[in-house]
Image (cartoon, rainbow, N blue to C red):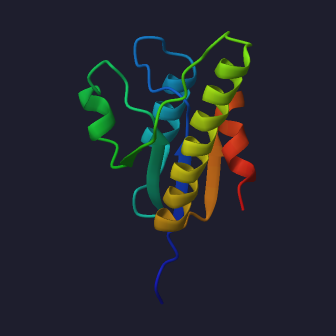
Amino acid sequence: MGRFVSRILFVHDLLDFKAGGAVRVILNLLSAMDAQRFDLHLGTPRSKEPTPAEFGELGAELHELPPLEQTSDRSLRGILKTLGELLRLNLAMLALLRRCRPDFVYVHSVTSMHFAVLP
């Protein structure tokens, strides 16, 4: 009898390996998961820093998402720019969900939590 493999998509808003914290938690989770039982994927904007070798050894497929720029501009122009970036990011995430077709989506930040509620 064949074994069921669960596909899990981890989503994080910033892959900043120098900062630690949430990224370290995701790396620890990925390293503890059995590659025979789980098909692992990570959706995140690319970091400006090089991806550490340890990430490549985890067997998770990396999917690049557009970055969401943090802004404090509360003018109409700033709000429209943020809405445009959110729309672009939502469309990219929806396309990733359709391509990847995960059984589970794991989010680890307030920003990435918004994508867990996409249809």
Hey, which quadrant is residue 36 in on the image? bottom left
69 or 21: nearer the eye?
69
Q: Is residue 108 visible?
A: no
Q: Position of residue 62 (x, y in %)?
A: 37, 45
- Looking at the image, residue 14 sits to the left or right of residue 109; the answer is left
For this orientation, the residue located farthest to the front is 76
Q: Residue at x 55, y 28 (%)?
A: 68
The foreground one among 35 and 20 is 20
- Which residue is at the front of the view, 17 or 68? 68
- The reply, left or right, for residue 119 in relation to residue 103 is right
Residue 80 place in picture, x, y as percent: 67, 29
Q: Residue at x 70, y 49 (%)?
A: 116
Give the total number of marks visible in the rendering: 0
Q: Relative to 79, is 74 above or below?
A: above
| Picture residue at 72% right of the left edge, 62% below the top | 119
Tell me residue 89's x, y (percent).
56, 42
Residue 66: x percent and y percent? Answer: 46, 37
Give the left or right position of residue 57, taking residue 66 as reference: left
Q: Is residue 10 visible?
A: yes
- Which residue is rendered at x = 71% and y = 55% of the image? 118
